[in-house]
Amino acid sequence: MADINVSASSRPAKGDPGVPARSGGLGEGDPLVDVIELFFFAYRNFVSDPDEILQGIGFGRAHHRVLHFVNRHPGMRVTDLLDILRITKQSLGRVLRELVDQGFIDSRAGASDRRQRLLHLTPKGEALAQQFVTLQSHRIRRALEECGPDSRETARRFLVAMIDPEDRGPVEKLIARADQQAEAKTSGASGKASPPAGGSLGATGNRPAPLVRPAG
């Protein structure tokens, strides 16, 4: 990546917050270039911590995404992963093959349909996925602490609002179900039968179906 040269006069002074506060108003059609650029730089740093580890083992960000979602949804189908990532089957196949060959993911045949491939992390894969979660959680937590009380909820509302309206419900339910499963596992309830792997992540078309159905 090319170096970005910033003149000394334009650099923030030591102790300066660096980014000047902007007015809260949003004019109609007003280009939000500052927010766009902050998104770029925030994301660049957000992924930089896992990137260093990934590069050391010859992997990239696609491998990270696969590890993350398989870790959150053990036993998920390959088709479910395609729905979430919205990449081509060919691209996912290459990444999965490398993760399986190097012992990070175990691809098992479904119990009721042997043609169905269900994905699980190996202990080696779980350790790597958790390492990434720890690194990125540390960065996010530090940023939220700098923003003051209720910043986590404000950040969540903003990120949900950035998602296309038709995808917000399915995405929030996807996260809620994974949280519930992780909590059950942590509390020692992992012996409970898991929902059928093929019954909740699938979708019509390319949209992920709700993972947690509304009560009633």
Image (tube, rainbow, N blue to C red):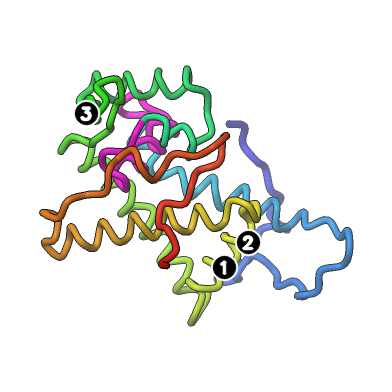
Q: Is residue 29 left or right of residue 62?
A: right
Q: Is residue 199 above or below residue 169?
A: above
Q: Is residue 71 magenta?
A: yes
Estimate the spatial distance between the alpha carbons at disc 2 and disc 3, rounded to whole Å.
35 Å
Q: Amino acid at mark 2?
A: Ala
User: Residue 213 at x, y = what percent?
Assistant: 42, 58
The residue tagged 2 is 161
- Observer-nearest residue: 49 or 120? 120
User: Residue 80 at x, y = what percent?
Assistant: 41, 36
Give whichever of discs 3 and 1 has the lower sequence position. 3
**Which numbered marker is on residue 157?**
1
Q: Which type of secondary structure does the marked residue at label 1 adopt?
A: helix
The residue tagged 3 is 106
Residue under the image location 50 percent in, 53 percent down = 171
Give the magenta-colored segment's residue range. Answer: 55-77
Determine the main secondary structure of the stretch shown in magenta. helix
Look at the image and tell me in which quarter the C terminus lies: bottom left
Q: Amino acid at mark 3?
A: Asp
Estimate the spatial distance between the alpha carbons at disc 3 and disc 1, rounded to whole Å.
35 Å
Dot 2 crowding, Cα within 10 Å, few <14, some 14–19, many 20+: few
Q: Is residue 26 above or below residue 5?
A: below
User: Residue 74 at x, y = what percent?
Assistant: 26, 42
Estimate the spatial distance between the alpha carbons at disc 1 and disc 2, rounded to whole Å.
6 Å
Which residue is most to the bottom?
149
Q: Amino acid at mark 1?
A: Arg
Question: Dots 1 and 2: beta carbons under 8 Å?
Answer: yes
Q: Which type of secondary structure does the marked residue at label 3 adopt?
A: strand
